[in-house]
Image (spheres, rainbow, N blue to C red):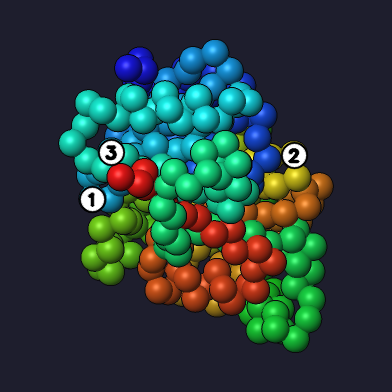
Amino acid sequence: MLPFKSIELKDKDIINSHLCKQNYRASDLCFTNLYSWGKKFDTQYATEGEWLFIRFRDNNNRNSYLKPVGGDNIKRAIETIIDDHQQFDTTFQIRGLTQEMINEIETAMPGAFDYKFNRSVSDYIYTTEKMINLTGKKLQSKRNHINRFKRENEWKYKSLTGNPALVKECKEMLDQWMQINLEEKDPSLVYDDFATTLMLENFEYLELKGGLICVNNEIAAFTIGEPLTKDTFIVHVEKAFTTIHGAYNIINQQFIENEAADFTYVNREEDMGIENLRNAKLSYQPDILLEKYNARLKN
């Protein structure tokens, strides 16, 4: 069996040394997400030669794996995690597979798995050009919200990079945001708050990028993200006070313009099956819906 262990901050470099070899653009394959959400999913990792293996528990507490990353012999890598899984009673499954990953598995192990589409964990990917310029009739309402925000407010964008005092202020804003939104009784908010707090507390070590919008010298919104692959930037967190019209729209646009303009794509992660979040992400007209599938070994 593989020597799996829980992911800790100190594991960043070893895990990233494997993740940097892939270009799937999938939000799962990011150290910050693996670490920050590790408590919720009991995320663990192991390495063997060129390969990185990730094991976790899904929302139904079933043991699961991500596609192994880093090496060439994918058949051998999958056989390794199949062997590791023999200690569990649940059905062997690999989750979060993109179509590109499936193609690789099918080439190496044709017909070995059944695949099921998982809409709630599929990633929303946009071109940076779209997120910055918001051109076209379908995004007219976004431009209108931003224009109204600019008319109604004295505002300023500030980068969090290299500014720990502002990062600390964002944590205070997060606490206020949580107090307001806990009334929604969404259980995922508790884990989201925990993950966001970890990102803010370890902002520099995780080498994150961030930005905020000030209105009358008070934080109205902030966002956290980082490079995911050579051509894709990932946005982990977007928080804004909805009492300020257009606050979400302005931070989304300004953050990408100031922190991620050199990338081709922006991955704004999944919607977790939450209807309001899905509608919000669809409203920006994604250029790619990075579909994710679960694979189960056939009997």
Seen at 64% across and 68% down, the residue is: 286
Seen at 50% across and 55% down, the residue is: 292
Q: In which image quadrant can residue 8 be found?
A: top left
Residue toward you, 253 or 101? 101
Image x and y of residue 23, in percent = 68, 40
Image x and y of residue 180, in percent = 33, 65
Residue toward you, 171 or 206? 206
Give, as a three-letter code, the residue at label 2: Lys
Image x and y of residue 245, in percent = 55, 77
Residues under numbered marks 2 and 1 in contact, where contact means CB atoms less than 8 Å apart: no
What is the secondary structure assignment of the residue under circle 2? loop
Q: Rate crowding at label 3 as few (under 14), some (14 to 19) or many (20 or more) other CA atoms within 10 Å.
A: many
Q: Is residue 213 above or below residue 67?
A: below
Mark 2 = which residue? 230
Q: In which image quadrant can residue 7 be found?
A: top left
| CA gap, disc 1 and disc 3 | 9 Å
Q: Rate crowding at label 2 as few (under 14), some (14 to 19) or many (20 or more) other CA atoms within 10 Å.
A: few
What is the secondary structure assignment of the residue under circle 1? loop
What is the secondary structure assignment of the residue under circle 3? strand
Seen at 30% across and 34% down, the residue is: 42
Give, as a three-letter code, the residue at label 1: Asn
Residue toward you, 285 or 174? 285
The quadrant of the image that shows the C terminus is top left
Give, as a three-letter code, the residue at label 3: Asn
Q: Is residue 222 visible?
A: no
Mark 3 = which residue? 63
Frontmost of labels 2 and 1 is 1
Mark 1 = which residue? 60
